[in-house]
Amino acid sequence: MTTFSSPPPAVGRLAPSPTGGLHLGHARTFLIAWLSARSARGRVILRIEDLDSARVRDDARTSALVDLRWLGLDWDEGPYIQSERRAFYDDALDRLKAAELVYPCTCTRADVERAASAPHPEDEGPTYPGACAGRCAADAQALGDRPFAWRFRVPPGSVAWDDLFLGRRELDPARLGGDFIVGRNGLGPSYQLAVVVDDALNGVTQVVRGADLVPSTPRQILLYRALGWTPPRFGHVPLVLGPDGRRLAKRDGSIKLATFREQGVDPRRLIGVLARSCGWTSALTTSSPADWIDRYNPDLLPDDPWVMSPDAKLHGPS
């Protein structure tokens, strides 16, 4: 008798960074991420990505939770706080050291920029020239007090994945900066390593985030493979642009969710505006996120960024 097992439930996540207040672009991406998991009857994990200590604001941590609840987005686990999870990242880095998949690099940013050749159009910044690649992990002991970073050895070849929104994608990490930093001695892990460790240990099966993070995906897939973990499904959402065609910025208070709250904007009206921007309706429907669970359709999401027009009608009767 043949038995069929049900696929494991989807596990998504919301991962705000408390370096400033959440804005309209965050709200749209988090709504899509939340619906992607909930429409599959899955769970949602909340993580606070606060490793950039120089830019983190204590008030932004609290504000992020208030913003999400105001929007009507809930979660089943968390919040997990990255700054409290250093031991997990250190363990993963130790595994990479043992496998000689990382090496200590003493090059400064200026060194890399001076040594870099003319970048290719698709490059993300200067490509690391490999000046320290001849070192092994144990060579870190001889560096004494010299500051250094741990760089991951990028293998040759492209990395491909089936994006939940963009379709098949293939990028060569060697052309996206080459060997990349996964940690700094005495300062902790990089974003790339921390998010992989957190998502893997939390059982995340789908990562929905902004399209500006597409270049991070092949690097993170390489880390998943190196640590013996199965990568999640990745989905990259087109960004939200202001009326001037520029990316929204946390420093612009006029598009922050906290500003909308203070102005008395109905969050259900905001959800309706965001749902319309995603192509799920042609009318402005005052609604909550839960109202869209059974109507969520990733295929209708426009390919181009959403330009936030001045007449978005966030203010008005509910």
Image: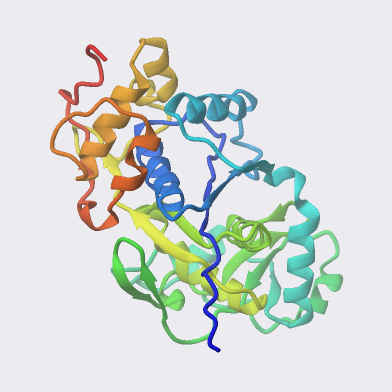
| Residue 183 picture location, percent across and down | 68, 60
Horizontally, is 252 left or right of 226 in the view? left
Query: Residue drawn 81% across and 68% down?
Result: 143
In the image, what residue occupies the spot 29% across and 55% down? Answer: 298
Q: Is 1 positioned to the left or the right of 245 in the image?
A: right
Q: Quadrant of residue 102?
A: bottom right
Quick check: can you spot residue 185? no
Residue 69 vertical placement versus 2 (above, below) = above
Residue 96 percent across, percent down from the top left = 72, 75
Q: 63 or 230: nearer the eye? A: 230
**Image-quadrant location for residue 100:** bottom right
Residue at (22%, 44%) from the top-left corner? 280
**Above or below — where is 174 with respect to 274?**
below
Q: How is the image coloured?
A: rainbow
Which sits in the foreground, 288 or 235?
A: 288
Q: Does 217 sit above or below residue 278?
A: below
